[in-house]
Image (spheres, grey):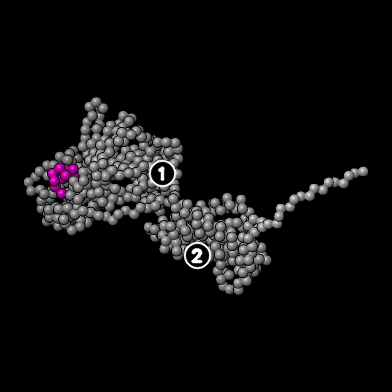
């Protein structure tokens, strides 16, 4: 006789509310109210809006429209798309996998506005809402007015997902919150453009030389592409000036000193590139004479910063005695044998660098001309990736501290933007050395640099170091640890340097400038 099975009485949990029961109840109540809304033209409009936002087509179209305008609109579009990419990846790859949820069914809403075909992925969270919120917030971080204009469109996309039966209201709320979060997370990835200060030039006293009377002009025909009528044009601009054309074997500094010592000469002018201008500027500082810069070389950065890119305007400034004050950079370089070094004194008008910086600038300028859609920051980032990822570091001792550097950059004056490829110098007399370096110190330095370049966070990357030397501290000491280094000064290459000292002489130079304010 078989015994009856023993029945085990399970202890039941006391009745309670299952997880998210309240949320589901609110979802169904809201959907019922939305289902009771009258039929109208808005039904078709919301269906169109939700389809337009599928795969972010709407946001890509808006970004393309914003990208046609330079400045904040273009940067806002790029930031918005970056936020959309992050939000879409997180929502669709991660959360839709770990939070499966059934979408509303046809009987929940009127059939005429129910979305067909219905998406098959998880209802939670809403990807459309995440992308909409991410784009509007990302744009708004860069340009609040544009973000405010897009906010109603993003809200319309989010609501359309409930109105067309694609999502429950809580799916939309969670997706929108994740989109906003993605925009703020990517805010730290996006390069924040620190606005440079307005161009401020300090007026200086200089003689008014009508027609160039009392002016000696140094012309270097080797500075760049020389037009046949350069000398004739200079004589038209300065009919009373002494114009001296350098021969191929002439020493620029010696010729400038001879002209400065000529009776009746009260100022020097130079036609040439930054290298020639720097040499003549050093002579002017020694002799206490003002300088007029006439851009005629491959590089004319100092002329640009002094507002002297148009020779006719420079001639008017010389005739009127309009001038500004400028600092002067100095370089003392030791070359040759360590026991008997040759000392060379040089002038630095703009920048000096060691390592890969010249290659970076060359590649950046190439991309700017060949791929204009990249713009300045994009071209600089791509050029930096190509330059540093495959570059070889240099061993240097900077102010007594040994380093492995890909590049060391020194600007005479503070440059903007504050990244690896500065372009603009608003002040000529701030008595600052702008020092920036890219280091190969520490683990994964190359990987960290590449990640910073891709995400636009070079300013906060440990591999990149930036700082200013001001006032009496505006001095830098650089020594080569591997024999000798190559130092580039204003585009001129100086090989075999064992040690270099760089410093600033505040207000050492007076420059004629069309942009000069009223005199002192």
Answer with left or right where residue 154 lies relative to residue 486. Answer: right
Asked if the magenta segment contains residue 105, the reply would be no
Q: Please, what secondary structure does the residue beneath circle 1 have? A: loop
- Decide: is 263 above or below 42: above
- Decide: is 115 above or below 421: below
What label does residue 153 carry, if any?
Answer: 2
Q: Report x, y in % for residue 386.
A: 41, 42
Answer with left or right where residue 84 lies relative to residue 458. Answer: right
Asked if the magenta segment contains residue 288, the reply would be yes
Residue range in magenta is 280-290
What label does residue 518 carry, if any?
Answer: none
Q: Quadrant of the C terminus?
A: bottom left
- Decide: is 29 above or below 387: below
The residue where tag 1 is placed is 461
Q: Is residue 224 visible?
A: no
* Disc with the residue nearer the chain's start (1 vs 2): 2
Q: Quadrant of the N terminus?
A: top right
Q: Report x, y in % for residue 30.
A: 61, 66
Q: Is residue 184 visible?
A: yes
Distance, label 1 to label 2, CA atoms, is: 36 Å
Q: Residue at x 32, y 38 (%)?
A: 354
In the displayed orientation, state which residue is furthest to the right.
1
């Amino acid at each position: 006789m078989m015994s009856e099975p023993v029945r085990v009485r399970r202890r039941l949990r006391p009745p309670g509310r299952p997880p998210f029961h309240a949320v589901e109840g609110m979802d169904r109540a809201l959907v019922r109210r939305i289902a009771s809304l009258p039929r109208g033209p808005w039904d078709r409009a919301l269906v169109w809006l939700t389809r337009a936002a599928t795969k972010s087509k709407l946001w890509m179209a808006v970004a393309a429209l914003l990208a046609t305008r330079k400045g904040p609109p273009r940067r806002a579009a790029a930031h918005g798309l970056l936020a959309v990419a992050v939000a879409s990846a997180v929502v669709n790859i991660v959360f839709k996998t770990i939070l499966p949820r059934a979408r509303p069914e046809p009987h929940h809403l009127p059939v005429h506005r129910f979305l067909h075909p219905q998406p098959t992925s998880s209802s939670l969270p809403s990807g459309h809402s995440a992308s909409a919120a991410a784009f509007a917030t990302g744009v708004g971080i860069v340009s609040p007015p544009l973000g405010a204009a897009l906010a109603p469109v993003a809200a319309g996309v989010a609501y359309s997902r409930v109105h067309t039966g694609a999502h429950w209201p809580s799916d939309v709320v969670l997706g929108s919150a994740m989109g906003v979060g993605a925009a703020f997370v990517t805010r730290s990835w996006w390069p924040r453009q620190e606005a440079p200060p307005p161009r401020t030039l300090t007026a200086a006293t200089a003689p008014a030389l009508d027609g160039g009377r009392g002016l000696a002009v140094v012309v270097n025909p080797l500075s760049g592409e020389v037009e046949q009528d350069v000398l004739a044009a200079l004589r038209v601009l300065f009919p009373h000036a002494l114009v001296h054309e350098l021969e191929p074997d002439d020493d620029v500094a010696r010729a400038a000193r001879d002209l400065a010592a000529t009776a009746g000469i009260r100022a020097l002018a130079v036609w040439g590139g930054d290298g020639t201008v720097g040499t003549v500027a050093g002579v002017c500082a020694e002799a206490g004479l003002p300088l007029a810069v006439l851009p005629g070389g491959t590089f004319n950065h100092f002329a640009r910063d002094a507002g002297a890119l148009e020779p006719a305007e420079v001639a008017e400034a010389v005739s009127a005695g309009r001038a500004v004050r400028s600092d002067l950079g100095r370089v003392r370089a030791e070359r040759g044998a360590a026991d008997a070094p040759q000392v060379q004194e040089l002038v630095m008008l703009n920048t000096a660098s060691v390592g890969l910086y010249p290659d970076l600038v060359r590649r950046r300028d190439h991309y700017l001309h060949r791929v204009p859609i990249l713009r300045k920051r994009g071209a600089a980032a791509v050029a930096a990736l190509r330059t540093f990822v495959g570059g070889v570091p240099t061993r240097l001792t900077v102010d007594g501290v040994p380093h492995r550097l890909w590049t060391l950059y020194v600007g005479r004056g503070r440059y903007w933007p504050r990244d690896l490829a500065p372009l603009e110098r608003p002040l000529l007399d701030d008595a600052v050395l702008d020092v920036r370096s890219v280091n190969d110190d520490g683990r994964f330095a190359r990987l960290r640099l590449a990640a910073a370049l891709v995400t636009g966070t070079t300013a906060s990357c440990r591999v990149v170091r930036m700082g200013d030397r001001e006032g009496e501290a505006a001095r830098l000491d650089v020594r080569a640890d591997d024999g000798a280094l190559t130092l580039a000064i204003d585009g001129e290459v100086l090989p075999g340097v064992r040690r270099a000292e760089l410093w600033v002489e505040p207000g050492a130079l007076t420059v004629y400038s069309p942009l000069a304010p009223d005199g002192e």
